[in-house]
């Protein structure tokens, strides 16, 4: 059972007491030498994709060490699906938490509410703060303070195999209805499935929910909306894609199954974001990068919608080396670092100035996703946002695999949300 609002104040108090115990178990003392030079250890939990993204971020961290030779950056890649709870457990116990964590945008307000993050206002971490894209900075704020620095921002689109589309003689679908028609033609002409729909991560459901005019909650009016008519309709839409044969899905290991199927040319489309580009290019179907097409997520009955995502860098409140941690965060979110990440990984910068850099301005992937990000739907930046996905993915998976109906699934999510969000309608 996830913590509800009633438990938050108590947990935050425990967390603040625990911060006196310090950060990672290894000695990270030192901060600044007598001459003002940074020193000591900074443990960084990176949650990027192993085999593609992690190499670039690790190299950047090594660049920081070259600029600050007395600082040792202890790089740890923590699987994304484990990082949220792992950090909370370590911070609550006061033992084993990193100095810096790469936080999914929804985790930041939760960690801040629990007292696990150091406020960054007035620190070296927030250099050139006004240069950050407004919606990227929104997730870093909580209760009037800044608790993280935006590193990358993203959204979702539909990735498609141009060779398969040409063979089948189809155009890119712009609506869900067209998606079904296109998938049927692809199956008839090539024998391949049209879409791989990831079934074990509810983030992949959001574009369909927004496309039907729905949302998870209405934070302003403190109302749960996931189980309203639009929410039920969205569940019906994804279920129909699977039942009609337009899409295949999974209940476990969705990321690897989806990526493998798409990279090997077994499916023609998948819904994904810029974080998947580097790994996708590694597939045999995309040795010629021009074979990868990307278009907006097909629209539902209410229009086209895609979620705003991204990652922030945050500093643990109990770090024993705050000065070096602040400097590390500033370095990793600097214009120079973001330009390198955009150039090598096609991840979208959070600084406005970076988009004018030649290598970024000429990147087709960045060029496609920037307008998508500009129109993306923001999630509510409340402490519980990061906890809304657990009950949703349970029912989303059950709907896709026929274990429950769309109506019952949506209603079950709504019930869990009202239990989590005490006092909400």
Image: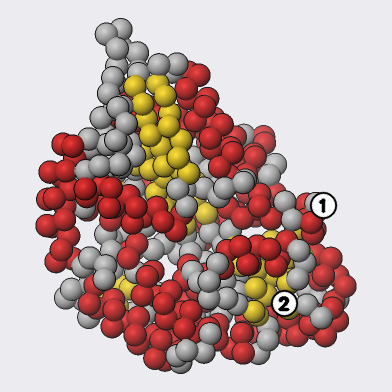
Along the polypeptide, which appears first: circle 1 or circle 2? Answer: 2
Residue shown at 34% from the left, 22% from the top:
40
Report x, y in % for residue 285: 79, 59
Vertical side of 314 occupied by 203: above or below = below
Q: Is residue 208 visible?
A: yes
Vertical side of 207 occupied by 31: above or below = above
Disc count in the image? 2
Q: Nearer the viewer, residue 324 or 74?
A: 74
Report x, y in % for residue 171: 78, 73
Q: Quadrant of residue 11?
A: bottom left
**Which residue, given by chain and number where applicable, does mark 1 sit on?**
288
Report x, y in % for residue 65: 47, 22
Element marked by disc 2: strand
Image quarter of the C terminus: bottom left
Q: Nearer the viewer, residue 179 or 92?
A: 92
Report x, y in % for residue 174: 67, 74
Element marked by disc 1: loop
**Which residue, given by chain and number where applicable, does mark 2 sit on?**
194
Q: Is residue 158 visible?
A: no
User: As drawn, is 369 to the left or to the right of 283?
Assistant: left
Residue shown at 33% from the left, 73% from the top:
217
Asked whether the beta carbons under mark 1 and mark 2 sit within 8 Å of each other, the answer is no
Residue 148 numbered tag: none
Q: Nearer the viewer, residue 142 or 283?
A: 283
Question: Is disc 1 surrounded by few (<14), some (14 to 19) or many (20+) residues within 10 Å?
Answer: few
Residue shown at 51% from the left, 48% from the top:
48
Image quarter of the N terminus: bottom left
User: As drawn, is 164 to the left or to the right of 9?
Assistant: right
Q: Quadrant of residue 421?
A: bottom left
Question: Is disc 2 surrounded by few (<14), some (14 to 19) or many (20+) residues within 10 Å?
Answer: many
User: As drawn, is 214 to the left or to the right of 275?
Assistant: left
């Amino acid at each position: 059972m996830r913590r509800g609002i009633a438990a938050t104040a108590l947990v935050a108090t425990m967390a603040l007491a625990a911060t006196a115990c310090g950060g990672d178990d290894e000695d990270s003392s030192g901060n600044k030498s007598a001459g003002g030079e940074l020193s000591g250890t900074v443990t960084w939990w990176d949650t990027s994709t192993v085999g593609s993204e992690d190499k670039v971020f690790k190299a950047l961290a090594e660049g920081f060490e070259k600029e600050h030779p007395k600082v040792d950056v202890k790089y740890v890649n923590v699987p994304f699906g484990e990082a949220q709870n792992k950090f909370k457990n370590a911070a609550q116990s006061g033992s084993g938490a990193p100095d810096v964590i790469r936080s999914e945008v929804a985790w930041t307000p939760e960690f801040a509410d629990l007292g696990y993050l150091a406020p960054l206002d007035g620190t070296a971490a927030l250099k050139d703060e006004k240069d950050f894209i407004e919606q990227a900075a929104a997730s870093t704020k909580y209760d009037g303070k800044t608790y993280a620095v935006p590193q990358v921002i993203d959204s979702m689109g539909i990735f498609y195999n141009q060779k398969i589309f040409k063979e089948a003689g189809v155009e890119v679908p712009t609506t869900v209805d067209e998606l079904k028609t296109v998938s049927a033609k692809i199956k008839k002409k090539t024998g391949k499935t049209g879409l791989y729909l990831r079934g074990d991560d509810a983030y992949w459901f959001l574009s369909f929910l927004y496309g039907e005019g729905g949302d998870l909650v209405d934070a302003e009016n403190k109302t749960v909306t996931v189980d309203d008519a639009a929410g039920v309709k969205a569940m019906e839409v994804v279920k129909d894609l699977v039942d009609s044969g337009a899409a295949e899905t999974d209940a476990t290991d969705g990321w690897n199954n989806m990526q493998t199927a798409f990279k090997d040319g077994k499916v023609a489309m998948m819904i994904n974001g810029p974080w998947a580009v580097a790994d996708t290019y590694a597939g045999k179907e995309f040795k010629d990068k021009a074979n990868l097409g990307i278009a907006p997520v097909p629209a539902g009955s209410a229009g086209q919608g895609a979620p705003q995502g991204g990652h922030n860098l945050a500093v643990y409140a109990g770090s024993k080396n705050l000065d070096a941690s602040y400097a590390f965060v500033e370095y990793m979110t600097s214009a120079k670092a973001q330009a390198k990440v955009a150039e090598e990984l096609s991840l979208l910068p959070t600084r406005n100035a970076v988009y004018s850099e030649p290598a970024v301005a000429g990147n087709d992937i960045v060029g496609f996703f920037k307008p998508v990000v500009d129109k993306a739907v923001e999630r509510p930046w409340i402490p519980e946002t990061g906890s809304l996905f657990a009950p949703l993915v349970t029912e989303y998976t059950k709907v896709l695999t026929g274990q429950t109906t769309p109506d019952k699934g949506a209603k079950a999510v709504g019930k869990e949300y009202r239990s989590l969000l005490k006092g909400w309608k």
